[in-house]
Amino acid sequence: MPSMAHVPFIIPIFLLTTIVLSAAAAAGVAVSPASSPRSAPPQSRPPPSPSSPLDPKQLLALHSLNIPTSKNPCTSPATVCDSSSPYSHLVSLSIANCSDDVALSVTALKSLSTLQSLAFINCPVSPIRFPPELTANLHSFTCINSLVKLTGVWLSRLQNVTELTVAGVSVNASGPSIILGGMKLLRSVTLSRCELGGSVPRHWHPNLTFIDLSNNRLKGKIPSAVTRLESLVHLNLSANSLNDSIPNTIGDLISLQNLSLASNTLSGPIPDSLAALPELTHLDLGSNHLDGAIPDFLKDMKKLRHLNLEKNNFHGVLPFNSSFIRNMEFFKVGGNSNLCYNRTILGPKVKLGIYPCDKHGKPILPPPSKDSTSDDSVDDDYSNLEQPKRHSGPSKVVLGVAIGLSSIVFLIVFLVCLSKCCR
């Protein structure tokens, strides 16, 4: 048994150990003598910098465009260089947040003709005609909130690009066709918020995988030619003025994962052929004039995570159960006045923006209210579906503090008894 002389040294050690163990219990951490730290996730290594210096002509071109350069411009996040010698050359360049005094020049762009990827982001400078050497070499072109007074003819000269992204730029063109007609290698196209009129092109190249023509002024039908693109993964035609019905051949897009046709004036039912799209994860048909019953096959689409059918003219009984709705990351069906849900399946208190059904499958409208407040049964919040109950009780922190205090009290009593025994 230790002597009383050693007690002052034992007390701090015991208290420290007790507090550490209590804190660990509060945080829910298992303390073990040989606990090993978790290994960090593998970091993706940046591409090695070319050993050769950048071509002096290209360095001069960057300076003339007022692009800040370090001692080795190839290490900048805005550039990618090849590994040629004696000088390396730029293959990718992103020009962002330009100052007011930036002006494009043919001489500078001709020196940058090795570029395969060129991006302008937040650079409202006036475009100039690209040198033929640069136009022929470009595989990717991006223009976001940049290049004022852009025209369809100017864009149409980029005939070798495989990726074209233009967004937030007013483009003077009769329609997308004048831009895309000659781009035989195109795989991905985004022409969004470009104030484009006309119609959706009727001729597409079969290698396309991504089409985004959203937020324009396109009119007319969705051409059936779009549905022949078997490699298409993403189709976004939302926020236009498209009318008529969704093509029955939409189910031919066997690779489609994202279909967004919201905010148009489309009418008619949801085509049955949509059931043939096993990879579909995102379906947005909101804010149209679609009608008919919501088809049962939607509940069998295993990969579907985003479903927006709000603000249409759908009627009948909602075919989904609570587990289907909980599985959604985004779900909207409100704004369909003749659509209702089965209270036996979804419960009486669910809020989906629609009313419950009567025995005839018709919405049960609430009695007229004297005040102007809306009825709680119509709400866009569907998160109050019955959730698994959580056990209430003291938190881990409270338990940890209680354990620590109890240990201290026990220690004091133990020391008092020990001192009496040693006398």
Image (cartoon, rainbow, N blue to C red):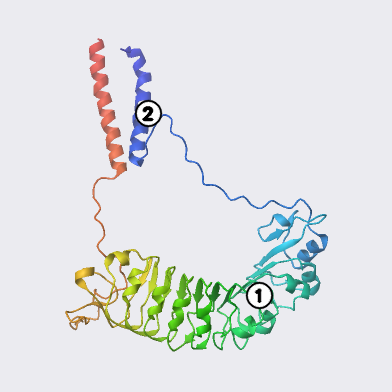
Residue 349 visible in image: no
* Secondary element at tag 1: loop
Q: Is 212 on the left-hand or right-hand side of 31? A: right
In percent of width and height, residue 4 lies at 32, 13
- Horizontal and vertical percent for residue 21? 35, 33
- Amino acid type at image mark 1: Pro
Camera-nearest residue between 399 and 186? 186
**With respect to residue 421, does 153 lie above or below?**
below
- Quadrant where the C terminus sits is top left
The residue sitting at 76% across, 66% down in the picture is: 114
- Binning the other alpha carbons within 10 Å of mark 1 as few (below 14), some (14 to 19) or many (20 upward) gives many
Residue at the spot 56% in from the left edge and 85% down from the top edge: 202
| Above/below status of 297 relative to 225 | above
* Residue name at image x 81 percent, y 72 percent: 107
Q: Which mark is residue 124?
A: 1
Query: Which residue is tagged 2?
Result: 16
Q: Residue at x 21, y 80 (%)?
A: 361
